[in-house]
Image: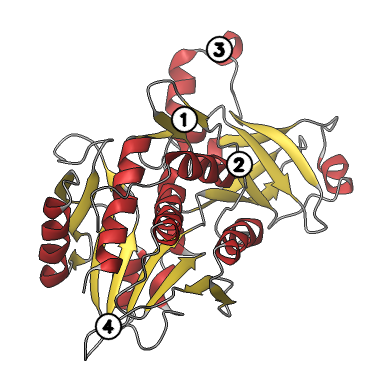
Amino acid sequence: MSINIQPNADFIREFLLNLLKIPSPTGNTEMAIAFVEAACQRFNLETYRTVKGSLVAKLPTGAVNNSPVPRTVMSHVDTLGAMVKEIKNNGRLRLTMLGGYAPLSILGEYCQVETASGQLFTGTVLLSRQSVHIHGRNEIHQLADSLDNLEVRLDVRTDSYLETEELGIAVGDFVAWDSRAQYTKAGFIKSRHLDDKAGVAAMLGAVEMMGRAQLTATHPTYLYFTTYEEVGHGGAAGIPVDTQELLAVDMGVIGEGQTSDEFSVSICVKDARGPYDLTMRRRLVNLAKAANIPINLDVYVNYSSDGSAALAAGADVRVALIGPGVDASHAYERTHLDAVLHSSRLITAYLTKP
């Protein structure tokens, strides 16, 4: 890949910010998938949907070697969220999680409830005993550790089960958190759901860059955007059957004991389910070094991905995992645009080198 070819920062930033605005909790991802599908089709990619509602796009392929290795690059559009578990007697909502996160991380968050008929109601996540003037700080701190003590206060006039039910709200309705996506003067993107919408943006950034530079993939290549990663089975099915190499693009985790940062590409060498493919890892490291792409090798002990889900489901493929470093994962997250741009560069290098 020519060193003069760089990702389109404006395209990636705007695509990511717009995708972050679209609610897509696991199980209710149609709007986000349609948004990504429209972008793929603007780049003249052939697309189709899987039975579970994931999206597959096929890249144009140029000259290949005598034994091409079909590849799939994957990320996920589904995010953390919740469902209505119960309408309480006071008209407020008790929740059940979609994905894994600390209850404290959503305390005070604005949210949106979508009914079966498509009606939308806004609200706020609060403790059932929230006011310090009534309950005191110590009691509130103890309550914040359990989702059972949280409730959604709807932005409508209701104070009973029947009044809320009459609105059309029911058990099983999806609840999405307000992403509060912002781009700062220093180049940071702070938002919920950078896991993994930043990875999706990196993939589309690579497609845009390859089209602008008139580059084609050196191997038969699919892009796979999944919809159930946060609950562990997004990558377990639907991977194009001829795939031999699978590159998962997901967030890198930042924190104590980790090497990842907000400005580089993280390459995960092992997660909770075991090591990723050594051959692919070495190739990615060499590609990054050749293109002066900053990388960090890291181990994530409380982490799994669509790539590890594919392996657990029995896929006979090589799997590697890369992605931009993301701070405060599964909470109010942050990364720097540079990390997403560098991820696009590494994806492009991977796709355009034999």
Return the residue at label 2.
Answer: 21
Question: Mark 2: which secondary structure?
Answer: loop
Q: Amino acid at mark 2?
A: Lys
Give the camera-side residue of 178 and 76. 76
Q: Quadrant of the C terminus?
A: bottom left
Point 43% across, 32% down: residue? 189
Q: Quadrant of residue 122?
A: top right
Q: At 16% across and 69% down in the image, what residue appears?
A: 280
Q: Which marked residue is nearer to the observer: mark 1 or mark 2? A: 2
Q: Residues within 10 Å of mark 1 (few under 14, many from 20)?
A: many
| Of the pair 113 and 130, the residue shown nearer to us | 113
Say if residue 210 shows up in the picture.
yes
Determine which of the numbered discs, if any, sits on residue 132 in the image.
3
Q: Nearer the viewer, mark 3 or mark 2?
A: 2
Amino acid type, callout 3: Val
Looking at the image, is mark 3 or mark 2 earlier in the sequence? 2
Q: Secondary structure at mark 1?
A: loop
Q: Which sits earlier in the primary sequence, circle 4 or circle 2?
A: 2
First in sequence, mark 4 or 3: give its number.
4
Q: CA distance from mark 1 to mark 4?
A: 56 Å
193 left or right of 154 in image: left
Instruction: Find residue 64 and name its label.
Output: 4
135 left or right of 238 in image: right
- In what quadrant of the picture does the N terminus appear? bottom left
Position of residue 120 in the picture relative to residue 174 (left or right): right
